[in-house]
Amino acid sequence: MHKNDFREITPNCYEIPKSFRPDMRVPARFYADRKLLEGALGDKSLEQLVNTATLPGVVKYALAMPDIHQGYGFPIGGVIATELPDGVISPGGVGYDINCGVRLLATHLDRDEVEPYLSELASALQANCPSGVGQGGSVPLKRQELERLVEQGSKWALKNGYATPMDLERTEENGCLEGADASKVSDRAFKRGLSQIGTLGAGNHFIEVDVVDQLFDETAANRMGLFPGQIVVQIHCGSRGFGHQICTDYVRDFQQAVHKYGIHLPDRELVCAPLSSPEGQDYLAAMKAAANYAFVNRQVLTFHIRRAFEMVLAGKVSSHHLYQIYDIAHNMAKIEKHQVDGRELELCVHRKGATRAFGPGSEVLPGAFRDIGQPVLVPGSMGTASWVLVGTEGSMAQSFGSTCHGAGRTMSRRAAKKAVRGSDLIRKLEASGIHVRAGSMPGLAEEAPSAYKDVDRVIKVVHGAGIARKVARIVPVAVVKG
Amino acid sequence: MKKYETVDHTADWALRVYGTDLGDLLTNAALGMSSLMVEHLDDIPSQLTRHCEIEGHDAESLLVAWLSELAYFAEMEQLVYSRFALSQVSSQHLSAQLSGGRVTELQKHIKAVTYHDLEIAETAEGLQATVVFDV
């Protein structure tokens, strides 16, 4: 694949025509500037994007966001929409960490007030929020209770004292995808899920204390309650072993389904089944259960984070209260209605490493955000900036209400591990005023900022393309890694 | 003959595995995966044994199912195996006697084994496959 295969649509969007490969059903579009385009040609991510344009029922374009990088099957940063009833749903198009996502909580405090306690706060967050492999959760559950939890999502958390009504109102889908069915989930998934509610896990997941660095849209920032110098908290994690097992089970089962439905694919990880088929419906119901698990997981972590703030800050600062700004998924398939070429279509929108970004006026948004658009949370790599954006009319018109989800890797984990030592990285981060608590040193090195793209550049593209709008840039002061 | 090697993949970890026949390839893939989870294979105690039977639709899905089983034991019980005696190997089935033990810390958490670009290919020396892990 060569950059000459791409046609420039705008300086922030490039297209690969349908004629590029005979099995493409629609063209593919990549939101990027020239440098990000050239960078993405370095791995298989754009070939993976073209592969997703071959899925039965795909409409308009297969899309990729500027934070694209190589995944397995779908690229990370990919968005495709398939038309109901016979378009397909692909477990690999959602990914293993179903409803991996980000939550943003805000304090009423500014940095100066919290500064003296940051180190203690980082330690308390690490102690309160179990992370790493094999770390049991803090919520002992029996199988039956877990079945209720995955069908009810955050409503379960509210009933059990882990959530506030405002938390639910400010979570995508109010923290519960209706139609989740525990009977479509394997025993093994339940076994893996039983001990992991309220745990961070390993890999790129984290809890981060940030400070609001700069505002770009005063109206939207005010509506969210954001102000310069403010202390906020990000949580990045997903459905843990429960979601991974559901994806593993259905990718295995769908190896047969593709033969049954006569679907030919360029990569076995792309296996899929029509949404109208029993296989497609079963996966959708199981995926929803994992999505609900992830919403509860981030909710229980929120509960622990609030406790850590109380333990460290109560009586020492004006208020240790943490309120929720938003919680958003970036690995999910959703049934949504979108306008395509003047017609309203019912679509299954797969977002694999991409965030929903609904524009102003959307009925699913809570009242406070309905006229500014949906908050979009884009974490950067460790030690670098993260962004708060809002969805726009442009994202509704161009990208099925979707935008980017992060910085996007540019260096392999193996290369990062060779290039960077975990202990050196900690020293460097601490020297720049960031408190770091990490479960594993080699794991930390794999997540080195130099292994990622420049998140500010990624944001410039989505803002420039009009598929999200900048609201605030936030920078880290304390990081807890799994 | 090389048994396995790690290869570059932007987001995750990948192993290229080799074998004289399918049983050998499956054994080397398991060894390779264990080598990602611990610093040195020799450090794995061999006090515990376990028997398992794995089914697949074809050789590739058997390979994924087999490694997924081992990843499951590692996640749930911190158990890593270093010796694998395989028998009755076909492209749809294997029986295995595993020997290994509990480790204090897993160096890498293998969360899932993918089918991405997975194909068991014949080479002049035998068989070869590249497996991508979700970590």
Image (cartoon, coloured by chain):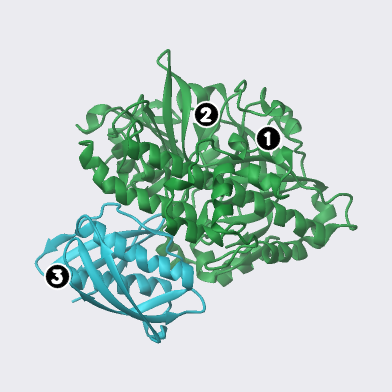
Chain colours: A green, B cyan
Alpha-carbon span between mark 1 and mark 2: 24 Å
Tag 2 near tag 3, CB within 8 Å: no
Mark nearest the camera among 1 and 2 is: 1
Q: Callout 3: 10 Å neighbours few (<14), some, many (20+)?
A: some
The disc, 1 or 2, on the residue closer to the chain's N-terminal end is 1
Place residue A64 in its image quadrant. top left
Give the labeled residue for mark 1: A169
Give the labeled residue for mark 3: B21
Element under label 2? loop
At 83% from the left and 58% from the top, the residue drawn is: A313
Q: Where in the figure is residue A275, as x and y percent of width and height?
A: 36, 32
Q: Callout 1: 10 Å neighbours few (<14), some, many (20+)?
A: some
Q: Which mark is residue A396?
A: none
Q: Could you tell me which chain the residue with mark 2 belongs to? A: A
Q: Where in the figure is residue A167, as x and y percent of width and height?
A: 70, 41
Q: Viewed as shown, does residue B76 lie left or right of A146?
A: left
Q: Is residue A262 above or below residue B77?
A: above
Tag 3 near tag 1, CB within 8 Å: no
Element under label 1? helix
Q: Viewed as shown, does residue A230 lie left or right of A423?
A: right
